[in-house]
Image: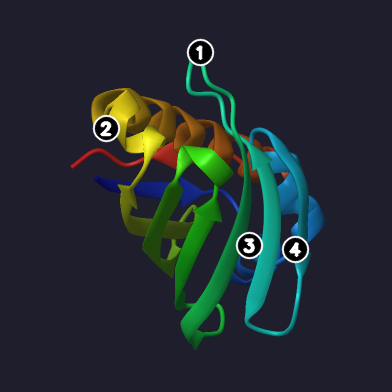
């Protein structure tokens, strides 16, 4: 599965970068997030309840940052452990740039599923994931008084 997005965020790039690395902001923005915390300077652990319709698994996720270029870009790699439901894993490339109205945030993400979650159907999961992404960016910008406007190309 592939997801992508491009937003204008109405604040400067450094503020967006700081917010992307603030676990309190992230917890408030990620639907179903019970906990997210830094394990060290490149790794986070999160517990997220995912709503897949009839099934609402609680995933423990390990997230690693790599290719970090402060206030410009990084790659997030993650894997969610859903117990008997299987695994969800993926990565996202995130890029920030300056814009006359604040900054731009662009991402491309890829994910894959295994086990029972995969059997539910990638179409259902894909639709749920896109909704999570959309709500994340709306909540994210609101956390620091900004707006996130999608750029359609």
Q: Is residue 153 left or right of residue 48?
A: left
Q: CA distance from mark 3 to mark 4?
A: 6 Å
Is 44 in front, or is 7?
A: 44
Q: Residues within 10 Å of mark 1 (few under 14, many from 20)?
A: few
Residue displayed at 57% across by 45% down: 83
Mark whose residue sits in front, 4 or 2: 2
The residue labelled by disc 2 is: 122
Secondary element at image label 3: helix
On residue 92, the disc is none
Task: Look at the numbered discs 3 and 4 and tell me whether their residues touch, using CB distance below 8 Å.
Answer: yes
Q: Is residue 89 left or right of residue 37?
A: left
Of the two numbered discs 1 and 3 on the same chain, state the one appearing first in sequence: 3
Residue displayed at 57% across by 67% down: 63
Q: CA distance from mark 4 to mark 2?
A: 30 Å
The residue labelled by disc 1 is: 54
Of the two numbered discs 4 and 2 on the same chain, state the one appearing first in sequence: 4
Whether residue 149 is visible? yes
Secondary element at image label 4: loop
Q: Residues within 10 Å of mark 4 (few under 14, many from 20)?
A: some
Q: CA distance from mark 1 to mark 2?
A: 15 Å
Q: List the single residue furthest toward the front.
A: 84
The residue labelled by disc 4 is: 22
Mark whose residue sits in front, 3 or 2: 2
Q: Place residue 116 in its image quadrant.
A: top left
Residue displayed at 25% across by 38% down: 152
**The C terminus: image quadrant:** top left
The residue labelled by disc 3 is: 20
Of the two numbered discs 1 and 2 on the same chain, state the one appearing first in sequence: 1
Q: CA distance from mark 3 to mark 2?
A: 27 Å
Task: Look at the numbered discs 4 and 1 and tell me whether their residues touch, using CB distance below 8 Å.
Answer: no
Is 105 in front, or is 76?
A: 76
Mark whose residue sits in front, 1 or 3: 1
């Amino acid at each position: 599965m592939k997801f992508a997005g491009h937003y204008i965020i109405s604040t400067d790039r450094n503020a967006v970068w700081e917010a992307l690395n603030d676990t309190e902001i992230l917890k408030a923005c990620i639907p179903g997030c019970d906990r997210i915390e830094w394990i060290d300077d490149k790794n986070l652990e999160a517990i997220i309840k995912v709503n897949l319709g009839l099934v609402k698994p609680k995933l423990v996720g390990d997230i690693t940052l790599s290719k970090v270029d402060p206030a410009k870009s990084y790659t997030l790699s993650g894997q969610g452990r859903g117990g008997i439901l299987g695994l969800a894993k993926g990565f996202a490339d995130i890029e920030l740039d300056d814009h006359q109205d604040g900054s731009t945030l662009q991402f491309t993400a890829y994910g894959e599923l295994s086990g029972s979650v995969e059997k539910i159907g990638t179409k259902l999961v894909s639709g749920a994931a896109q909704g999570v992404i959309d709500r994340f960016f709306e909540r994210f910008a609101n956390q620091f008084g900004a707006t996130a406007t999608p750029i359609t190309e």
